[in-house]
Amino acid sequence: MASSDAGTSWGSEYQVFLSFRGPDTRTGFTDVLFHSLIDVGIHVFRDDEELRVGERIDESLLQVINNSRIYIPVFSRNYASSQWCLCELAQIVANTLKSEGNKEILPIFFDVEPNDVKLKTPLYHNAILNLEHEKKLSNEQVNVWREALMEVDAIKGWEVKKYKGHGELIKLVVAKVVECLKSKHRLVTEYLVGIDDQVVAVSKLLDVDSDGVRLVKIYGMGGIGKTTLAKVIFNLLSSHFGKCCCFLEDVREKSSRTDGLVHLQKRLLSEIGHPTGTKNIDEIDYGIKRIEEILCNKKVLIVLDDVDNNEQVEKLVGKGTLYSGSRILITTRHKDILQVNRQNHQILDYEMEVMSDGHALELFSRHAFNTDFPSDDYNHLSREIVFATGRLPLALEVIGSFLCHKPQELWKETLHKLRKAPHEDVFGKLKISYDALNFKQQQIFLDIACFFIGEDKANAIYLWKGCEFFPDTELLPSLACLW
């Protein structure tokens, strides 16, 4: 098998599947196209039937085809002489037809005419007849290939002979692929450290290959990396949902604006393929109604980032039944979000934990030194700063970038300040959690931070009950993470 080395470390997920006849284009046109797609960050699988044994598509290749978002068959003179290529094409067409517009075929006519593929000339027509006689194939099997070829030919593709050179055409193909994918993928931080296990764990909870509906909540303190994790997972899994996926960032902040939730509702509907249905939405209740009408009939992947109450969830995905196979991923600072009953929906939690010491030092070093580890003369200072930040990714990135190429004196001064208070860019992010608490919760928070860290919880609770703060309800679950 000749396959892409651009696959992710979290599984064989590809955005583009190349189908071609090895001897015709492997070392020329297809190779340049393959590397041009990789160069712009696209995960590509290229299959070469010449390197395979047998005549049936195995399960691993079938899974790659099923999970890919865009298919590029490169039709050459000997493409239809390969039983493997024709089987592959039939599977590609079947996947595209049942995807309801979420997958696309972008055909390239390398040294053949569209009429050849349409079986109007002897080239492909005779090639299939020869295969039928040599392999003693059934009419049913051969007809599937013919129908697949006819289906693909109905799609507008590129005829290589109409362009000045391969380079010009390949640029157009790459641009088209990027256009098809760009609106869905989210930008993530340059340095992803210690995230692989988290991605695997949350992907397992989402389990996009299973039926039913799942709502997964990633919760944890501010600055811990919830949004980054959600973006990576969204980029990884969005190909399973085609155009029917949406990432709504900063829900808490945006919903607080005038008509903020209405704008979020419109964006959600627009991104999952219903832009015309947003024009008449001018109030929240009608927006909920339209969303429920769409989501009960469409398999979707929706990420709601930084949610701080259940009302936001209800107004953005409704209260009705979601279509089987749909997945909702939520990030929040509050453990009690989504603690509701939804009929026929699985609601699963994932607690985001602080980075390990080793991963925290590596992330800091990448921003401060552009290496995985600090230099010897900065080793002790680096470890002290990592400890002072509480190993929060946000703080490590901000402070590491700030200290890059700075003298040691500034490092020592920064460490001294960090031991007294967080960096101002980090403080603003963390204070959001404090501001979201009610008055009694804020008093309990301050008591813990100033007097009770490491102390017996029972004594603190006895004190708060005396002040009529009712800690059993005020403290939990909002502040339980402090002990």
Image (cartoon, rainbow, N blue to C red):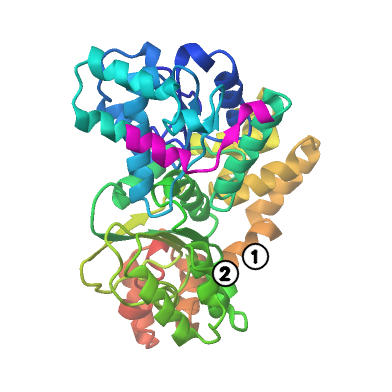
Q: How many marks?
A: 2
Q: Can you say which quadrant of the picture contains the N terminus? A: top left
Estimate the spatial distance between the alpha carbons at disc 2 and disc 1, rounded to whole Å: 7 Å
Q: Can you say which quadrant of the picture contains the C terminus? A: bottom left
Residue with the mark numbered 2: 432
Q: Is residue 47 visible?
A: no
Please give the range of residues in magenta: 146-162
| Residue 156 inside the magenta-drawn segment | yes
Circle 2 SS class = helix
Q: What residue type is labelled 1?
A: Gly
Q: Nearer the viewer, residue 320 or 338?
A: 320
Q: Which amino acid does label 2 sit on?
A: Ile
**151, above or below 205, in the image:** above
Tell me: 257 left or right of 139.
right
Residue with the mark numbered 1: 428
**351, above or below 197, in the image:** below
